[in-house]
Amino acid sequence: MTEPAPTKVDMEKIVSLSRRRGFIFPSSEIYGGLSSCWDYGPLGVELKRNVKEAWWRAMVQERDDVVGLDTSIIMHPQTWVASGHIKSFSDPLVECKNCHLRWRADEVSGNKCPSCGGELTEPRQFNLMFKTFMGPVEEEANVVYLRPETAQGIFVNFQNVLNTTRKKLPFGIAQIGKSFRNEITTGNFIFRSREFEQMESEFFVKPGTDEQWFHYWLEERLNWYLKLGIKRENLRLRQHTKAELAHYARDCYDIEYQFPMGWAELEGIANRGDFDLVQHAKYSGKSLDYFDEETKEHITPYIIEPSAGVDRSVLAFLCDAYDEEPDKDEIRVVLRLHPRLAPVKVAVLPLSRRENLVKVATEIYAELRRCWTVSYDDAQSIGRRYRRQDETGTPFCVTVDFQSLEDEQVTIRERDSMNQIRVPIAALRDTLAAKLEGEDLFVLPPDGKIWKEGKDG
Ligand code: ATP
């Protein structure tokens, strides 16, 4: 982590909003919580699913050169010998001789314990993989590990995918799933936790074309965050120094985001060369070659890996979207999330609980729910209800009022501008669909006409 950069949002506000509105809770909270483990609440789970879906859509669904995979968390223990994790996936640790707290050696200066001032030991390597036992007998022969990254599941299935899909180079395999690391220093909310999710793609290319593909993926990945609304000034690319490069990497860049605590890694993009396929071929005794029809040669592809964290992305999207603006005597908190990421797309708000209004509103609610995650709110004033939806990032509110009973039209109110338009109920679903897919806000639906324009409040 470098250059502390004060942004207008501080982490406490994000943590407090997440807690208050049901995005993220501390894990097992009734027992006092479990250090750096988090539970996603009703809105958080929707946001997280939307982040994963947006990634899958861009990385698999919209491409014809990438296929998906879902591999198991527990893998054959030899995997981790071949990958180098048993040998090198460790952090140097120092321990306080007095209070026995452990610290990452690169995060303390001098040899005094940051907590009690006691003397620290010499650094020792500490493996970050979680160990457990498979089967009923807890003995060394049965040790297995919870995967610390999803990538290895892809490498060991390279031949399976090749044989079943008949893909030609260059092609990729993508996977989203849980990973586990027994991190020594955690914190900064969901930024670094011990159980987290990754979105990883391994893109196999002919050696010699790797640099070109590496740069292609740097651009693609940076654009993914920009297209989903992250501000350009909060993103940067940082190349790893030679000393920093992981044992497998020929080159690596981090996409960094300006989090409230400073610039920090959001995603790593590495040129892994042929390291992984060579290693797994060596340890498994199975060929992981690719037969190049053009040159009639067997080659070992190079791999370009964009590896992103789901939870870190969620945090970045939350921080970037958070906004406060004066609203009469109060402050309007608004999450300006991209509509594709917003946990709830539309809120249906009947102006009152009168039976005839409720009937129309619930019919609209039932219809829209078939397409999106929609909420229904009839409690308190309409102004308060708009604010509640703003705070959780709902892009559109549909207000059903008494006029609706006569003219069969409703008001769509937009979160960011607070603009309102009036549309026929018959055109409501199509209008919302166009808006949610990112077409210009507030273009007229083909047969809709504006009844009222203005701001709420
Ligand atoms: P860091 O240096 O921050 O620990 P890393 O370089 O070890 O991260 P990678 O191994 O490159 O991370 O993992 C790829 C991505 O997975 C990271 O960019 C990050 O988004 C996510 N990630 C890694 N470790 C964690 C963690 N402990 N908690 C949450 N996300 C993580």
Image (tube, rainbow, N blue to C red):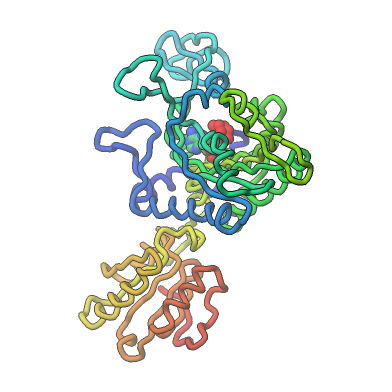
Q: Is residue 1 shown left or right of residue 340?
A: right
Residue ID at (64%, 39%): 254
Residue 236 percent coordinates (x, y): 66, 45
Between 362 and 107, the residue placed more toward the observer is 362
User: Which of the 4 image quadrants contains residue 396?
Assistant: bottom left
User: Which of the 4 image quadrants contains residue 241?
Assistant: top right
Would residue 107 be seen by someone viewing this image from the given angle? no
Residue ID at (60%, 53%): 224
Above or below 174: residue 383: below
Residue ID at (72%, 27%): 242
Q: Is residue 8 shown left or right of residue 39?
A: right
> How many numbered circles are shown?
0
Residue 275 percent coordinates (x, y): 66, 29
Above or below 398: residue 36: above
Please identify the residue farthest to the bottom as the structure is shown. 406
The image quadrant where one finds the N terminus is top right
Above or below 228: residue 434: below
Residue 68 percent coordinates (x, y): 53, 48
Between 426 and 96, the residue placed more toward the observer is 426
Residue ID at (46%, 77%): 430
- Ligand 1 placement by image quarter: top right
The image quadrant where one finds the C terminus is bottom left
Residue 194 percent coordinates (x, y): 43, 32
Between 319 and 151, the residue placed more toward the observer is 151
Would residue 446 be seen by someone viewing this image from the given angle? yes
